[in-house]
Image: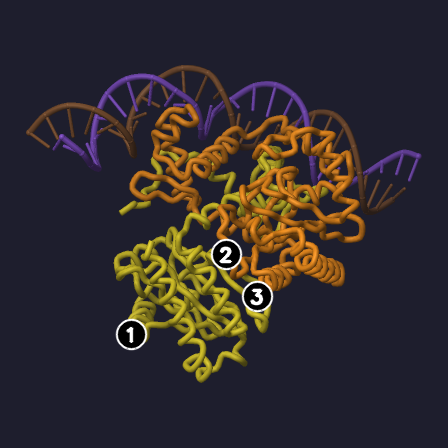
Chain colours: A yellow, B orange, C purple, D brown
DNA sequence: TTTTTCTGTTCGGGCATTACGAATTTCCGT
DNA sequence: ACGGAAATTCGTAATGCCCGAACAGAAAAA
């Protein structure tokens, strides 16, 4: 089952290449010396990497500041387009967003992390700081916990071993057993809540998207606490979510 | 003006790293030996690169087949979210798609290539093979030609020198002078057409999005030839496009 | 202006690391 | 169980990175 074995002879230069790009991302751009300081490498090395990345088109430079380039969106968009779930879910996300006026989100798992595969913004939705494609820890969101809930237990253990249970806010679940209890509850309820666990003032409800008995993703609606009360969730949001998940599940398998 | 100078000492390993990922993309995945054959490198090298890329999370492996991973969508989505144009244009794209029922697209330029920054699919739209983030040659699309039309001539010359004018279909403009004539016409008309120049059976109309007198992107509606006749374009599509472009231009500068 | 102090860039030598071919193991299908 | 092809490991050779130092160029201070 594709054991992610440590490479015996890793290509270190490739690793540092991505370390550099990731640093540019986490610091919203950097100059040559800034990057050299951040990664504790000689300026000349930083210079060489940035210049080659720029030349290859993966990094853009505007008077000294280097930034992550849109070229990555080509690779990422391609990867996304290969996901069957993406094409069948997109129209349903749009319908969900239109029906609720809030954000509708789709998350999938890769390498033990959650990836926002797509989203659609309803006309009432308040703008979020998160973006399509963003990768998040699975245990920190309703979407992610939904996915974990439907994965085999040993897989979940693997993921925890690999990525740990770092806290995002003070309400994040950080204990192994506590998490498994939460997952059992989600399985039983067939939906997950996120009450300001990831972002202050934001509530979220998520349902699984299954293919047979294996989970392929999770669907959610998220909005400000003021509009996302339990009553509205039960009477409006959840039925819409379940309907959408059903349609996606059907279209997913049926060719 | 950020001259893209050749790096004096390019990091070759970083270059081959991206060559590998791009090859995975253009061949829709590959095994170790396939990749080794494609790039004419030893199997062991191909193996080392693929394993490290897999371990870093940028490539996924499913029984022997390696593919471009969704991790790139994180970087790409981040890069996109930094573009102010993206956030102000997204609601207008949605409105355009709803109003026309067709695909509404937004293209920007980076490194002399066009990047589909966003798109929205109307309910009548036929599914396209292209995807969000896809990078295209500017001279092969109505969107790209619109951008070229509003760039300073020397910049266009630079871009042609760098990327050439390769033909995509038999109707692609491949002659320098022919292109400049087309661009003049686009400036005069303030819109560009694409009549099956990129994809058979698909028509497209594009208008510029300006900020002062510099172009920041181009907006288009595309649909099947059968529905995209001149009459509908003039009476319905173009007015909608112009309205959307105007709103975007206003919101872009204002704060 | 001159001086100072940054940052970006170039250069060259030492050595870590990648490239490479062959050997080995694993995984198929037969 | 066997044969073939693919993946993986191993060891060696030399390429290509690492790194400090020197240089240039621009902005800030004097």
Q: Which residue lies furthest to the bottom in this view?
A: A231
Which mark is first along the chain, 1 or 3? Answer: 3
Numbered marks: total:
3
- Residue A160 horizontal/vertical position (percent): 34, 58
Marks 2/1 same chain = yes
Q: Who's the residue at 54% across and 73% down the image? A: A101
Q: How far is disc 2 from disc 3 in space, using C-alphas?
A: 12 Å
Which mark is first along the chain, 1 or 2? Answer: 2
| Subunit that carries the residue with mark 1 | A
Residue A65, relative to residue B27: is it above or below?
A: below
> What residue is pinned by disc 2?
A134
- Residue B250 horizontal/vertical position (percent): 75, 61
Image quadrant in which you'd find residue C3: top right
Determine whether label 2 and label 1 are within 8 Å by CB.
no
Q: Is mark 1 on a helix, strand or loop?
A: helix
Image quadrant in which you'd find residue A249: bottom left
| Subunit that carries the residue with mark 2 | A
Q: How far is disc 3 from disc 1 in space, using C-alphas?
A: 30 Å
> What residue is pinned by disc 3?
A128
Q: How crowded is mark 1: few (under 14 residues within 10 Å), some or many (20 or more)?
A: few
> What residue is pinned by disc 1?
A188
| Subunit that carries the residue with mark 3 | A
Q: Who's the residue at 33% across and 72% down the image? A: A190
Marks 3/1 same chain = yes
């Amino acid at each position: 089952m594709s054991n992610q074995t440590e490479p015996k002879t890793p290509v270190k230069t490739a690793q540092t290449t991505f370390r550099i790009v990731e640093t540019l991302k986490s610091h919203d751009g950097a100059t040559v010396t800034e990057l050299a300081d951040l990664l504790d490498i000689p300026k000349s090395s930083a210079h060489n990497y940035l210049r080659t990345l720029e030349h290859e088109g993966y990094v853009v430079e505007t008077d000294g500041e280097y930034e992550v380039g849109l070229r990555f969106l080509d690779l990422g968009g391609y990867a996304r387009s290969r996901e069957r779930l993406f094409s069948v879910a997109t129209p349903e996300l749009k319908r969900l967003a239109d029906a609720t006026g809030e954000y509708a989100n789709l998350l999938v798992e890769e390498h033990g992390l959650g990836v926002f595969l797509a989203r659609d913004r309803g006309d009432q939705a308040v703008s979020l700081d998160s973006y399509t494609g963003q990768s998040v820890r699975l245990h920190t969101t309703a979407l992610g916990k939904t996915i974990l809930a439907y994965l085999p237990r040993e897989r979940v253990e693997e993921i925890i071993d690999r990525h740990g249970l770092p806290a995002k806010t003070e309400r994040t679940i950080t204990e192994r057993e506590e998490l498994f209890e939460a997952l059992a509850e989600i399985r039983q309820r067939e939906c997950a809540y996120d009450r300001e666990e990831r972002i202050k003032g934001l509530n979220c409800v998520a349902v699984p998207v299954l293919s047979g008995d294996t989970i392929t993703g999770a669907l959610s609606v998220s909005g400000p606490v003021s509009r996302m009360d339990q009553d509205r969730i039960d009477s409006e949001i959840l039925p819409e979510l379940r309907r959408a998940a059903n349609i996606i599940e059907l279209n997913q398998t049926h060719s």
